Amino acid sequence: MTTQLARRGQGDHRPAKRHRRQKYSAEPLATVPDESELGPAMLKLTPKQRAFVLELRHGPAGYGSEVRAARAAGYGPSTDGCMRRIAHQVLHNSKVQDALREVGGKLIRAAAFGAIRNTEAIANDFKHRDCLRANLALLDRGFPAELAARAGLDPLVQIEAARAKQIEGVAEPIAD
């Protein structure tokens, strides 16, 4: 014990630095499509930046995903600290941010069809507690509020009427 303290310096009681194992493989998961399939924001990027954006889109999410995407995009085998800085710089580049918005918008539009299907299933299930809300949401998207108002429907009033009413009371003990 004293030899360890002597090597590290007297009074230096910091714990040894913890080394995390690499969480994700740096193998590329995405293939960069032809330029004819890319949007205008993706076309403004360098090939490495394109690969980075696509790796973020296709790769796992979570701690270390940006570093994994930078490595998979070919930003070089550097130390973890250096790769974190590189990933941060690339991620905060304004052109990369525009490309992420472009790719994210496509994902949201594609997922919207699934959300509509789910909302429709709830709207058609008359026993579901959110049936009325789902129907109103579909009605509002299909026919804007102006048309609903012309038909004499007030969505806010109907939503309020559909809310569960709270029953107030006082519990009294029963003598056996």
Image (cartoon, rainbow, N blue to C red):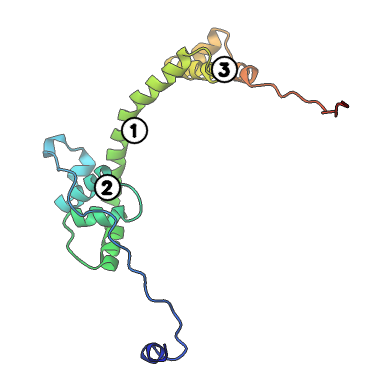
Label 2, label 3: how many angstroms apart (C-alpha)?
A: 40 Å
Query: Real-space Cα distance between discs 2 and 1?
Result: 15 Å
Instruction: Check disc 1: other Cα within 10 Å, few if <14, some if 14-19, many if 20+.
Output: few
* Of labels 2 and 1, the one closer to you: 2
Instruction: Provide residue 27's location: percent of width, then percent of height.
Output: 17, 52
Amino acid marked by disc 1 = Ile
- Left of 17 or right of it: where is 40? left
Closer to viewer: mark 3 or mark 1: 1
Q: Residue at x 65, y 21 (%)?
A: 164
- 137 displayed left or right of 102: right
The residue to which callout 1 is attached is 108
User: How many numbered discs, if any?
Assistant: 3
| Residue found at x 25% / y 42% | 58
Relative to residue 84, is residue 15 depicted above or below?
Answer: below
Q: Which quadrant does the C terminus fall into?
A: top right
Q: What element carries label 3?
A: helix
Residue 129, compared with residue 64, is above or below; it is above
Furthest residue in direction right, as rendered? 175
Q: Which mark is residue 56?
A: 2
The quadrant of the rendering that contains the N terminus is: bottom left
For label 3, the crowd category at 10 Å Cα-Cα, with few meaning under 14, some 14 to 19 and many 20 or more, is some
Lower sequence index among marks 3 and 1: 1
Work out which residue is located at the far front of the displayed protein and give it.
176
Mark 3 touches mark 1? (CB < 8 Å): no
- Mark 1: secondary structure: helix
Q: Residue 155: which disc?
A: 3
Residue 128 or residue 136, whichever sits in front: 128
Name the amino acid, label 2: Leu
Could you say where residue 105 lies in the image, as x and y percent from the top left? 31, 35
Q: Mark 2 falls on what kind of element?
A: helix
Depth check: give the residue in front, 135 or 152.
135
